[in-house]
C-alpha cells in the first residue's frame, strides 16, 4: 500500500537511516555515556570505577578555580555579547544610510567573520605585545604602555576587545538585513507627524528589528560561552587562571590532567549553561517582539 | 540643514575609521611578513624593501603545503558527505508524513544545543577504541555535526518544491533514488551553495576538533600546524606573520572573489 505522498515508508527510511545512524553513534551515545560516567570516579584508564552520584558536581561547585572559570566564562559571554550587539547595531544604522562604497564597506567590515579565530588571536597577541605599548608610549597613556594581556586586571577587557572585533561583523550584517526589511513609508509617515530621529529609532526601528536582536544576542552568547581558540592564542588562560574558559577547563582537566569524570561533569555543566541561557534569552526577548 | 550635514560627515568619518580598524590586523600582517627580519624601526611602518624570504622559510619550516593538502582533503571530503547526508536525510524526513518523522526532525534539530565541547571526552574514548583518531574520524565528525543545520535548512527548502513534480517523474518511471538525485537534488542548489559556504569556513578554520582528534602530525591541518610551531615563531615575528598570512590566503582569495555570496550565505544560515 502506498502512502499519500506516493511511496512506501521503507524508502523514506532508507533516505533517513544513514544520517540517523551517524547522529546516534557520534552524538546521542557520547552525550548519554558522558553523563553516566560523570556520576562515577573513573579516571579514564583504570579498569574499575565506582558510582559516586553527584559528588563530581558538588566538588566542581565548591572548587575555587572552577567557580572562577564558570564566572569568567559567563561574564565574558554576556559582556561581549552586549557590547558586540550595541556596536553592530550602531554600525548597521550608519551603513544603512545612502553612502558611497557601501557594498565595499560591508565587505571590509565582514572580513573578520571569515578568518580563523586561532590566527586572529595570534595576530592580536602581537598587537597587544608590540603595537599598543608603542601607542601608549607616544601618547603618554600609562596603562597602555605594558602588555595588557599580562595585566590580570585589564586582560578581560583586552580579550573582550578582540572578541567584539571578531564577532560584531556577523551581527552587523544580520542587522543590516533586518533594517532593510523595514518599509520606508513608515519613516515618511513619522516625519510628517513630526517625529525626531530618536523617536523614529525608539518607536519604529527598534521594535521592528527585535527579531534580529533576539537572533544576534542568542548567537553571540552561544559562541562566547563555547570560546576556546581565541583564548588559547591570546592568553592560554592566563595570567594565572584569570581567562580560563569552560572549554579550556574540559580540555585541561579531562585530557591533560586525566581527571576524566571531573572533566565530564564540567562538560555537562557547560551543556546545562548553554541550554538555560538559550531558553532564557528566547523567552525574555521574544516577549518584546512586534509583528507588522 | 547645516547641522545635519555635519552629522553626516561625522558618521562618514566614523564609518571609515571603523573600516580601518577592521583592516588594521591584516595590514600589520602583510607589512611585517614582507619585512626583512631585523630591518628594525617601527613595527607599523611599511617595509623599506619588499622581501619574500619569510614566505619561503614559512613554507619549509611550517610544513605549509602538507597542511594545505590535509586541510583541503578534510574540507572537500567533509563537504561532499555533508551535502549527501544532509540532503538525503532532509528529503526522507520531509516526504514522510507520520508522527515519528516529525519527532525525528526535532531530534535532529535539537542536536544544535550540544556542541562538540560537551561530547569531546566520551567521544575520544569511543573513537580511539575503534581506531578512528585520524583524518577519517575528523571527517565523520564534521559530517555528523553539520547535520543539525543541513537538515534544518534543506527541510525548510524542500517544503517549497511541489509534489506534482515528483508524481510526474514517477509516472515517467523514475525510481525513488534516481528521482532524488536527478530531479530533487538539482533543485536544492541555492541551499547547497549556502551550506558549502558555511561549512567550508567552519571546517577550514576549526581548531579544537583536529587538535583532539589527530594523533599523527603528518595529518595536521593548517591551524593545528600554527599552534604546534608557536615556540619557533615566538623568536621570529616576520616568519610568524608570513606563516599566518599564508594560512589566511586561501580564504582571503576566495572571499575577495565571492564576498557577496559568502556574506549572504553566512547570514541566511545564521538567521534561519
Image (tube, rainbow, N blue to C red):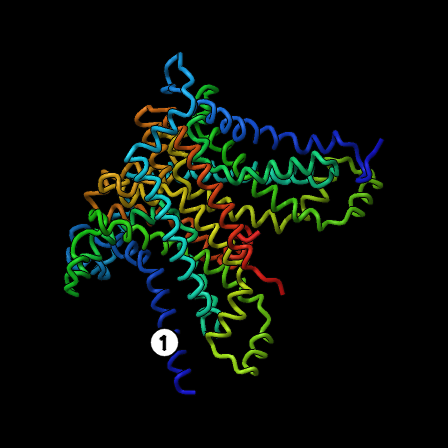
The residue at 34%/49% (across/down) is A120
The quadrant in which residue B154 appears is top right
- Mark 1, residues whose alpha carbon is within 10 Å: few (<14), some, or many (≥20)? few
Q: Nearer the viewer, residue B55 or A68?
A: A68
Q: Quarter holding the N terminus of chain B?
A: bottom left
The quadrant in which residue A10 appears is top right
Of helix, strand and loop, which one carries label 1? Answer: helix
Where is residue A183 shown, x and y percent of the image? 60, 71
Considering only vertical position in the picture, is B201 above or below A13? Answer: below
Whether residue A169 is visible, yes or no, is yes
Q: Furthest-bottom residue in view? A: B1
The residue at 19%/58% (across/down) is A144
Please give the residue where the numbered disc 1 appears in the rendered image: B10
Q: Nearer the viewer, residue A166 or B191?
A: A166
Chain to which mark 1 belongs: B
Q: Furthest-top residue in view? A: A47
Considering only vertical position in the picture, is B106 above or below B250? Answer: above
- B192 relative to A42 in the view: left or right: right
Where is residue A23 shown, x and y percent of the image? 57, 31
- A6 relative to A98 in the view: left or right: right
The residue at 65%/40% (across/down) is B90
Where is residue A95 shown, x and y percent of the image? 45, 68
- B175 relative to A252 in the view: left or right: right
Considering only vertical position in the picture, is B131 above or below B40? Answer: above
Q: Nearer the viewer, residue A148 or B90?
A: A148
Where is residue A155 shown, x and y percent of the image? 25, 49
Whether residue B59 is visible, yes or no, is no
- B47 relative to B98 in the view: left or right: left
Amino acid at each position: 500500500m502506498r502512502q499519500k505522498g506516493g511511496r512506501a515508508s521503507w524508502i523514506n527510511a532508507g533516505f533517513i537511516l544513514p544520517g540517523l545512524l551517524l547522529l546516534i553513534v557520534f552524538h546521542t551515545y557520547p552525550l548519554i555515556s558522558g553523563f553516566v560516567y560523570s556520576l562515577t570516579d573513573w579516571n579514564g584508564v583504570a579498569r574499575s570505577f565506582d558510582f559516586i552520584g553527584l559528588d563530581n558536581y558538588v566538588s566542581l561547585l565548591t572548587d575555587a578555580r572552577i567557580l572562577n572559570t564558570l564566572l569568567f566564562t559567563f561574564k565574558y559571554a554576556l559582556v561581549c555579547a552586549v557590547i558586540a550587539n550595541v556596536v553592530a547595531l550602531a554600525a548597521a544604522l550608519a551603513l544603512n544610510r545612502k553612502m558611497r562604497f557601501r557594498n565595499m564597506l560591508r565587505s571590509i567590515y565582514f572580513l573578520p567573520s571569515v578568518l580563523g579565530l586561532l590566527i586572529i588571536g595570534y595576530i592580536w597577541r602581537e598587537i597587544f605585545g608590540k603595537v599598543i605599548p608603542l601607542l601608549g608610549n607616544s601618547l603618554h597613556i600609562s596603562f597602555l604602555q605594558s602588555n595588557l594581556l599580562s595585566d590580570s586586571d585589564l586582560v578581560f577587557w583586552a580579550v573582550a576587545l578582540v572578541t567584539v572585533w571578531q564577532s560584531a561583523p556577523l551581527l552587523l550584517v544580520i542587522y543590516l538585513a533586518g533594517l532593510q526589511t523595514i518599509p520606508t513609508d513608515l519613516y515618511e509617515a513619522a516625519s510628517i507627524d513630526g517625529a525626531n530621529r530618536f523617536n523614529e529609532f525608539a518607536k519604529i526601528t527598534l521594535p521592528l528589528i527585535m527579531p534580529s536582536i533576539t537572533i544576534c544576542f542568542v548567537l553571540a552568547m552561544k559562541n562566547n560561552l563555547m570560546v576556546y581558540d581565541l583564548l588559547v592564542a591570546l592568553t592560554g588562560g592566563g595570567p594565572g587562571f584569570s581567562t580560563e574558559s569552560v572549554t579550556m577547563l574540559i580540555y585541561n582537566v579531562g585530557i591533560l590532567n586525566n581527571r576524566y569524570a571531573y572533566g565530564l561533569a564540567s562538560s555537562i555543566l557547560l551543556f546545562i549553561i548553554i541550554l538555560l541561557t538559550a531558553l532564557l534569552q528566547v523567552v525574555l526577548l521574544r516577549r518584546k517582539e512586534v509583528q507588522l | 540643514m547645516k547641522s545635519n550635514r555635519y552629522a553626516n560627515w561625522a558618521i562618514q568619518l566614523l564609518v571609515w575609521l571603523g573600516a580601518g580598524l577592521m583592516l588594521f590586523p591584516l595590514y600589520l600582517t602583510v607589512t611585517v611578513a614582507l619585512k626583512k627580519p631585523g630591518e628594525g624601526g617601527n613595527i607599523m611602518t611599511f617595509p623599506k624593501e619588499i622581501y619574500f624570504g619569510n614566505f619561503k622559510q614559512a613554507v619549509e619550516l611550517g610544513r605549509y603545503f602538507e597542511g594545505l593538502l590535509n586541510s583541503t582533503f578534510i574540507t572537500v571530503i567533509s563537504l561532499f558527505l555533508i551535502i549527501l547526508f544532509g540532503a538525503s536525510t532532509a528529503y526522507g524526513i520531509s516526504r514522510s508524513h507520520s508522527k515519528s518523522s516529525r519527532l525525528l526532525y526535532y531530534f535532529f534539530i535539537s542536536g544544535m544545543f550540544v556542541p562538540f565541547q560537551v561530547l569531546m571526552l566520551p567521544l575520544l574514548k569511543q573513537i580511539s577504541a575503534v581506531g578512528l583518531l585520524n583524518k577519517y574520524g575528523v571527517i565523520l565528525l564534521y559530517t555528523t555535526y553539520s547535520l543539525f543545520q543541513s537538515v534544518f535548512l534543506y527541510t525548510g527548502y524542500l517544503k517549497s518544491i511541489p509534489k506534482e513534480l515528483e508524481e510526474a517523474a514517477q509516472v515517467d518511471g523514475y525510481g525513488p533514488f534516481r528521482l532524488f538525485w536527478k530531479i530533487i537534488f538539482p533543485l536544492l542548489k541555492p541551499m547547497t551553495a549556502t551550506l558549502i559556504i558555511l561549512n567550508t569556513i567552519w571546517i577550514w578554520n576549526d581548531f579544537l576538533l583536529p587538535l583532539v582528534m589527530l594523533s599523527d602530525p603528518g595529518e595536521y591541518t593548517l591551524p593545528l600546524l600554527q599552534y604546534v610551531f608557536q615556540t619557533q615563531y615566538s623568536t621570529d615575528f616576520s616568519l610568524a606573520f608570513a606563516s599566518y598570512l599564508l594560512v589566511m590566503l586561501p580564504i582571503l582569495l576566495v572571499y575577495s572573489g565571492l564576498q557577496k555570496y559568502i556574506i549572504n550565505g553566512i547570514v541566511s544560515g545564521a538567521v534561519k
